[in-house]
Image (cartoon, helix red, strand yellow):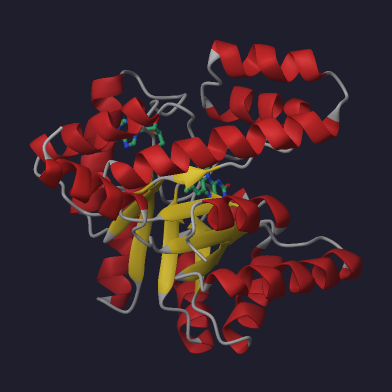
Amino acid sequence: MRPREIEEKLFMTHTKLPVSVEFFPPKTPEGAQKLRATRQTLYALKPEFCSVTFGAGGSTQQGTFATVSEILAEGFAAASHFSCIGATKATVRTQLQTLQAMGVKRLVALRGDLPSGYGAGGEFHYASDLVAFIRAETGDAFHIEVAAYPEVHPQARSADDDLKAYVTKVKAGANSAITQYFFNSDAYFRFVDDAYKLGIDVPVVPGIMPITSSTQLMRFSDACGAEIPRWIRLRLQGFGDDTASIKSFGLDVTTDLCDQLRNGGAPGIHFYSMNQAGPTVEICERLQLV
Ligand code: FAD
């Protein structure tokens, strides 16, 4: 390695990265109270924004908007997730007006998944339809994030089709993307390169899922198509019910992943906090991002 490369590497290793944090809307007053405390701890990271998920079919709309409102009142930028499956244009228009009146400037625009048993219906088929609609209705009022899938969306016809679908939704007016979580940084870097070759250069921020529970991680990963490498799966299985070892191993794995992403030029890190402060803060401290 040339001295210049070593210097660059050292510089990259200590580069601060913008961090964003994701929450889900609490279902009970106790959950809301706990989330307020979690947010206060996470605000020490000076997140670029905090986002709040949105149940498909608008099922959590009230809780999502209430949590977004609290974050704004606490003096931090908030992004509302916004899913369109099963929705009508009239409902989406009203919700967009509500968000604008609340002072929200950032949306994570999604298709969403309807729970099984619900007929899709609605006037939107894909996230790209929603992005185009938001732009047509509100111009540049919102910074629009979309979802990206370095390991391919589970319902995609092919990896190529999925990449083209990503290109379409960015061209419909998205400003940046947040990825589904993954544990293999090559998948992320390849996705970014492939999108770039198709003329898409908006920032793609990797979504990071801290590992705190094996069963929860396996369940989520089966549902969303995120691959857990065999060695991670086996190590987690080997820990059995030893939660302290699971958490300690999980912190090592996700911190290394974030470091690889930072060194490779990722533009930021988005943490799926699962409404917990501890793992996200610990990873950021280890990376000296705080
Ligand atoms: P799309 O981009 O519309 O893609 C969905 C599928 O359709 C893909 O397989 C794609 O390849 C295919 N496709 C797209 N366009 C076309 C086309 N023109 N022709 C044929 N096929 C096409 N879910 C929630 O319910 N609430 C949330 O708050 C939430 N937040 C999320 C945040 C992030 C960062 C991520 C990564 C996911 C989130 N999800 C959330 C999950 C998401 O809703 C699901 O993954 C959903 O199945 C797809 O949503 P999408 O916006 O990526 O869909």
Q: Quadrant of residue 268?
A: bottom left
Q: Quadrant of the N terminus?
A: top left
Q: Is residue 232 above or below residue 86?
A: above
Task: Report whether 74 appears left or right of 164.
Answer: right
Give percent across and percent down for residue 31.
84, 64
Up-down relation of residue 153 to residue 11 (above or below): above
Ligand 1's image quarter is: top left
Q: Which of the 4 quarters of the picture holds residue 224? A: top right
| Between 98 and 244, the one nearer to me in the picture | 244
Task: Identify which residue is drawn at 45% across, 83% down.
Answer: 100
Q: In the image, residue 174 lies at what x, y percent?
A: 27, 58
Q: Where residue 194 sits in the image (x, y, percent)? A: 18, 32
* Viewer-closest of 59 and 79: 79
Task: Kindly indicate the quadrant of the structure image that contains residue 73.
Answer: bottom right
Regarding residue 192, the answer to whether it shows in the image is: yes
Towards the viewer: 151 or 258: 258
Q: Residue at x 53, y 17 (%)?
A: 229
40 vs 231, left or right, is right
> Residue 89: image x %, image y %?
43, 62
Total marks drawn? 0
Residue displayed at 55% across by 38% down: 254
Q: Residue drawn at (83%, 67%), measured in percent from left and top?
A: 34
* Image height of 142 relative to 278, above or below: below
Report if residue 275 is visible in the image.
Answer: no
